[in-house]
Image (cartoon, rainbow, N blue to C red):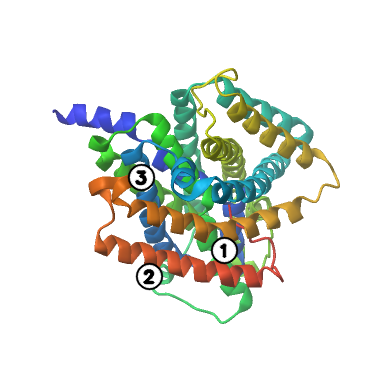
């Protein structure tokens, strides 16, 4: 096959890995990185290296299961661990993702209010766009829209360069770890890791690979798609931290939300850097509002044995479409209610995601090592060592984060 032929195959198969990883940089994730840069400068940049490795390992396992089995993760958990375990997991995930979806609409509202657009206009418009795209569009159309929207994340890269960082200091802090025995520093360290690997990502990635119908012979392309997405998402995180570390940290400006960073940037990095930061936040929030409810609809329907998929109609997959519709409509309405307890719901979402993540990863690792499920595509010994090591570290960090969340510092919940 010619190089052009191989390139066309690659372009037709990429998507799930890049989209899943990039959309993990949602409103909650961007808030975490912004707060980290504003409060501790470049000191936390080094954390992005081990988190990138962990993300590649975990997403690689999930992608391989999707390619080999042609099924979603919920499907496999139900088949091998029973309906009861799957049902309780789905209930917790539903509540957690509900909180995350609220965070996405809140991020969209806050970012557009910077430009003087009322949340009572932008939230209903955003909700309608999201609903029409998923319920009326095909999987291919939705994927293309999401891939193009992922390019908007480059706004953070431009903001980073426009802020004028000290590149020598940046690279030193990227490759030389700094540890401060400060409760706020430790919590933000854990929050950065926690916002990078979330339960919903695993379900969405595997379901989208299964729906796209990627076969075993194209597994290498799928793996490259995942690796590319993992690097992209953490490069964006890198530049968000740099932007806030360069402009806000030296002046002691403390923030609790990503949109506050966009406003605070204006006098230090200029109006264009500020606008790019805000537009990128709106884009990320909108993408999160598409994907998080979509992943919820996927895994609930798979777990219950109902029809699921973006290519299906309301008549063909009523439960899938109604779960998606209910999640985005109720979340959007709550954001529009002045006295709604949004912060409480978002913190609850982070806590539930933190509790659930170890269970999801242990299920995934047991499944990927089952020869009845994976055949010759089970983990190698080295891969298992890295995978279980990653899971143990994540469980330990999650436990620490849950304990520290009893007295949360700022709004550092992950996406």
Provide the residue designation for mark 2: 175
- Report whether 257 appears left or right of 236: right
Q: Is residue 145 above or below residue 345?
A: above
Crowd tier of the residue under label 1, counting other residues whose Cα lies within 10 Å: few below 14, some 14–19, many 20 or above: many
Residue 158 visible: no
Q: Which residue is mark 1?
A: 191
Q: Which residue is mark 3?
A: 65
Residues tagged 1 and 2 counted as in contact (Cβ below 8 A): no
- Mark yes or no: residue 220 visible: yes
Horizontal arrangement in the rendering, residue 293 relative to residue 45 (left or right)? right
Q: Earlier in the sequence, mark 1 or mark 2?
A: 2
Q: Nearer the viewer, residue 408 or 57?
A: 57
Return the x and y of residue 71 as percentages of the image width and height: 41, 37
Residue at the (50%, 78%) spot, across then down: 179
Helix, strand or loop at mark 3 = helix
Vertical order, 14 against 261 (above or below): above
| Mark 1: secondary structure | helix
- Tell me the quarter of the image containing the N terminus: top left
Q: Earlier in the sequence, mark 2 or mark 3?
A: 3
State which mark lies toward you, 2 or 3. Answer: 3
Q: Gap between marks 1 and 2, in whole Å?
A: 20 Å
């Amino acid at each position: 096959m010619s190089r052009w032929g191989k390139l066309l195959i690659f372009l037709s198969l990429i998507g799930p890995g890049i989209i899943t990883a990039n959309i993990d940089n949602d409103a909650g994730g961007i808030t975490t990185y912004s707060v980290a840069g504003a409060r501790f400068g470049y000191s936390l940049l080094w954390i992005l290296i081990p988190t990138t490795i962990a993300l590649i390992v975990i997403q690689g396992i999930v992608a391989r299961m999707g390619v080999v089995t042609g099924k979603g993760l919920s499907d496999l958990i139900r088949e091998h661990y029973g309906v009861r375990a799957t049902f309780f997991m789905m209930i917790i995930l539903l509540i957690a993702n509900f909180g995350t979806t609220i965070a996405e609409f809140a991020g969209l509202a806050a970012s557009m209010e910077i430009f003087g657009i009322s949340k009572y206009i932008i939230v209903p418009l955003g909700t309608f766009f999201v609903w029409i795209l998923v319920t009326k569009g095909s999987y291919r159309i939705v994927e293309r829209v999401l891939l193009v929207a992922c390019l908007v994340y480059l706004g953070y890269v431009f903001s980073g360069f426009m802020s004028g960082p000290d590149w020598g200091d940046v690279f030193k802090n990227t490759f030389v770890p700094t540890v401060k025995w400060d409760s706020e520093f430790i919590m933000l360290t854990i929050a950065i890791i926690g916002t990078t690997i979330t339960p919903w990502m695993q379900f969405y990635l595997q379901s989208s690979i299964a729906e796209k119908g990627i076969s075993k012979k194209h597994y290498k392309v799928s793996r490259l798609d995942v690796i590319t997405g993992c690097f992209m998402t953490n490069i964006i995180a890198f530049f968000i931290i740099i932007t806030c570390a360069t402009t806000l940290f030296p002046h002691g400006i403390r923030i609790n939300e990503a949109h506050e960073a966009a406003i605070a940037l204006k006098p230090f990095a200029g109006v264009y850097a500020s606008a790019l930061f805000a537009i990128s936040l709106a884009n990320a929030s909108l993408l999160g509002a598409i994907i998080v409810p979509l992943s919820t609809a996927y895994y609930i329907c798979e777990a219950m044995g109902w029809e699921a998929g973006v290519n299906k109609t309301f008549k063909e997959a009523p439960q899938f479409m109604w779960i998606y519709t209910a999640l985005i409509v109720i979340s959007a309405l709550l954001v529009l209610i002045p006295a709604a307890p949004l912060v409480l719901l978002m913190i609850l979402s982070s806590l539930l995601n933190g509790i659930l993540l170890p269970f999801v990863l242990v299920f995934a690792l047991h499944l990927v090592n089952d020869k009845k499920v994976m055949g010759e595509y089970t983990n190698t010994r080295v891969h298992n060592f890295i995978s279980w090591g990653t899971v143990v570290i994540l469980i330990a960090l999650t436990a620490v984060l849950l304990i520290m969340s009893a007295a949360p510092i700022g709004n550092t919940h992950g996406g």
